[in-house]
Amino acid sequence: VGALFTAVRERFGRLDLLFNNAGTFGPGGVPVEELAAADWRAVVEVNLTGAFLCAQAAYRLMKEQDPQGGRIINNGSISAHAPRP
């Protein structure tokens, strides 16, 4: 994550918007009552930790740039994997 935001700074000089989109729910077809703890931890790593690390890196970059600021939008959905009816 850090390398990605360093590359953004080097290429564009600033970051004005992060659209933080994460959404997974473990192995497909496994009912929630049968989901293994390790699979749940993987979901948390993607949906929460991944989003947090990207927001943290974006915030640091936005705070350092001149003028300061930008927007961070956090979105989460598993609809890409399991569309709603």
Image (cartoon, rainbow, N blue to C red):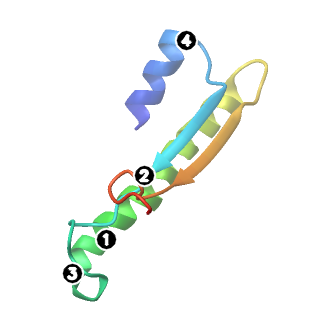
Q: Secondary structure at mark 1?
A: helix
Mark 4, Cα crowd under 10 Å, few <14 / some 14-19 / many 20+, is few
Mark 3 or 4: the one toward you: 3
Q: Amino acid at mark 4?
A: Phe
Residue receiving disc 1: 41
Query: Helix or strand or loop: what does disc 3 sit on?
Result: loop
Q: Closer to the observer: label 3 or label 1? A: 3
Q: Which element carries disc 4, helix, strand or loop?
A: helix
Q: Position of residue 58 (x, y in %)?
A: 58, 36
| Residue highlighted by disc 2 | 50
User: What is the C-alpha distance between the residues marked 3 and 2?
Assistant: 20 Å
**Nearest to N terminus: mark 3 or mark 2:** 3
The residue under the point 22% across, 74% down is 38
- Residue under label 3, please give it: 36
Mark earlier in primary sequence (3, 4): 4
Amino acid type shown at disc 2: Gly
Q: Are marks 3 and 2 in contact (CB under 8 Å)?
A: no
Rendered location of residue 59, percent (x, y): 64, 39
Q: Nearer the viewer, residue 53 or 34?
A: 34
User: Which one is earlier in the sequence, the residue at label 4 or at label 2?
Assistant: 4
Question: Quick one: label 3, few (<14), some, or many (20+) residues within 10 Å?
Answer: few
Other-residue count near label 2 (Cα within 10 Å), few / some / many at <14 / 14–19 / ≥20: some
As shown in the figure, which amino acid type bears the numbered disc 1? Arg
Say above or below: 14 vs 34: above
The single residue placed furthest to the bottom in the displayed view is 33
Q: Amino acid at mark 3?
A: Ala
Residue on which disc 4 sits: 12
